[in-house]
Image (cartoon, rainbow, N blue to C red):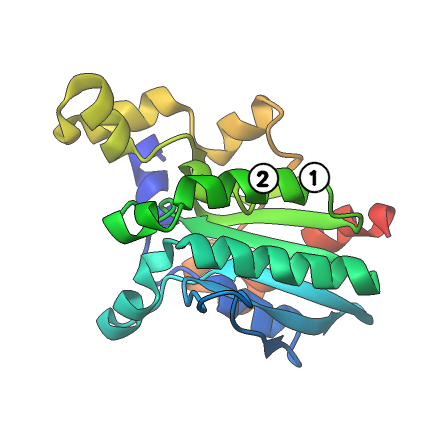
C-alpha cells in the first residue's frame, strides 16, 4: 500500500470516529459540555464512562458524518474553547483519580480568524504545558488523522499508540506542499517526505505501538476495530494504574 493510500484511508469518511469507539468501549458514556468560561466546542467530545470496571475520562476529536454535522463539528478542528474543555475534564480526572483516554483524529486546530483572535496558539501551548502536570494515567491513540499542533495539544500522554492506517504529522501533506514548494498539487510527494505513517512513526519512537486494524481497514468492521483498540489501550493503561 502506498503512503498516499494510507493517507486516504486515515481520512476515509466511513472510518470510525471517536464516538464510535467510545460508545463501544464504555456503553454508559455520558458526554459533558463546555469550558466553564465561554462556550462548548463540538469538535471535541468529552465525558465519563466505565471502562474495564473503572471510571474513566474519555476525550476525542469528532469530525461528523453528514455535511450538517461536519459543519457543526468544524470537521474535527478545535477552537480554543475545545482545548479549555479538555483541560477542564483532565483536572476533573485528576481530582477524582480517573485515568484518561484521548482519541486523536483531526487535520489540525482551526486556523480561522476567530480562533486566532481568541488565542488558539496560546490555548494549544497552555494545553501542552498543563497535560504534563496532570497526575493521573493518560493513554492517547491516533485513530485517523493526527495533524500538527491541533493533535499535539491532545496528545501529551504517558503512552501514545496509533491505529495501523492512521497518520501523525507536523502538517498535512497539502499544507507541507504549499509551504515547501508553494504547490499543493505535490501533496503525494509531501506525504512521502513527511514520514507520517504508523510504521514510520513507531520506528522513530514517537509512539509505543501500532494497533492492527481488521481486514479492509477499520472502516470495514467497527466492532473488530474497537476490540483491537480496546486491547491495546488496556495493555498500555494497566501498568500505569
Q: Quadrant of the N terminus?
A: top left
Could you classify mark 1 by the number of other residues whose Cα lies within 10 Å: few (under 14), some (14-19), or many (20 or more)? few
Query: Relative to 174, does residue 109 appear above or below in the rendering?
Result: below
Q: Nearer the viewer, residue 159 or 42?
A: 42
Rendered residue at 37%/40% (across/down): 6
Q: Nearer the viewer, residue 206 or 119?
A: 119
Numbered label attached to residue 175: none
| Whole-percent x, y for residue 112 in the image | 26, 48
| Whole-percent x, y for residue 84 in the image | 53, 56
Rendered residue at 82%/65% (across/down): 96
Per the image, label 1 sits on a secondary structure element best described as loop
Label 1 belongs to which residue? 132
> Residue 214, can we see it?
no
> Residue 173, can we see it?
yes
Rendered residue at 26%/66% (across/down): 71
Numbered label attached to residue 128: 2
Rendered residue at 57%/21% (across/down): 204
| Whole-percent x, y for residue 73 in the image | 35, 66
Per the image, label 2 sits on a secondary structure element best described as helix
Query: Relative to 127, does residue 187 appear above or below in the rendering?
Result: above
Could you classify mark 2 by the number of other residues whose Cα lies within 10 Å: few (under 14), some (14-19), or many (20 or more)? many
196 lies left or right of 30:
left
Report which quarter residue 207 is drawn in.
Answer: top right
State if disc 2 and disc 1 touch (CB < 8 Å).
yes
179 lies left or right of 137:
left
Real-space Cα distance between discs 1 and 2?
Answer: 7 Å
Q: Nearer the viewer, residue 190 or 81?
A: 81
| Whole-percent x, y for residue 127 in the image | 57, 45
Amino acid at each position: 500500500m502506498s503512503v498516499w493510500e494510507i493517507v486516504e484511508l486515515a481520512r476515509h469518511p466511513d472510518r470510525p470516529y471517536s464516538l464510535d469507539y467510545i460508545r463501544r468501549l464504555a456503553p454508559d458514556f455520558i458526554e459533558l459540555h463546555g469550558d466553564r468560561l465561554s462556550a462548548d466546542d463540538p469538535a471535541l467530545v468529552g465525558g465519563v464512562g466505565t471502562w474495564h470496571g473503572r471510571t474513566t475520562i474519555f476525550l476525542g476529536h469528532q469530525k461528523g458524518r453528514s455535511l450538517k454535522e461536519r459543519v457543526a463539528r468544524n470537521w474535527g478542528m478545535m477552537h480554543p474553547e475545545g482545548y479549555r474543555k479538555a483541560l477542564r475534564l483532565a483536572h476533573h480526572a485528576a481530582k477524582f483519580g480517573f485515568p484518561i483516554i484521548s482519541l486523536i483524529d483531526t487535520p489540525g486546530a482551526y486556523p480561522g480568524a476567530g480562533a486566532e483572535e481568541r488565542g488558539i496558539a496560546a490555548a494549544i501551548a497552555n494545553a501542552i504545558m498543563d497535560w504534563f502536570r496532570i497526575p493521573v494515567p493518560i493513554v492517547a491513540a491516533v485513530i485517523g488523522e493526527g495533524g500538527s499542533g491541533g493533535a499535539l495539544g491532545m496528545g501529551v500522554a504517558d503512552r501514545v499508540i496509533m491505529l495501523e492506517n492512521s497518520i501523525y504529522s507536523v502538517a498535512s501533506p497539502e499544507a507541507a506542499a504549499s509551504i515547501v514548494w508553494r504547490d499543493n498539487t505535490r501533496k503525494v510527494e509531501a506525504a512521502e517526505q513527511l514520514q507520517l505513517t504508523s510504521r514510520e512513526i513507531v520506528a522513530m519512537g514517537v509512539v509505543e505501538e501500532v494497533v492492527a486494524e481488521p481486514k479492509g481497514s477499520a472502516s470495514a468492521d467497527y466492532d473488530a476495530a474497537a476490540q483491537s483498540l480496546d486491547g491495546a489501550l488496556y495493555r498500555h493503561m494497566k501498568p500505569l494504574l
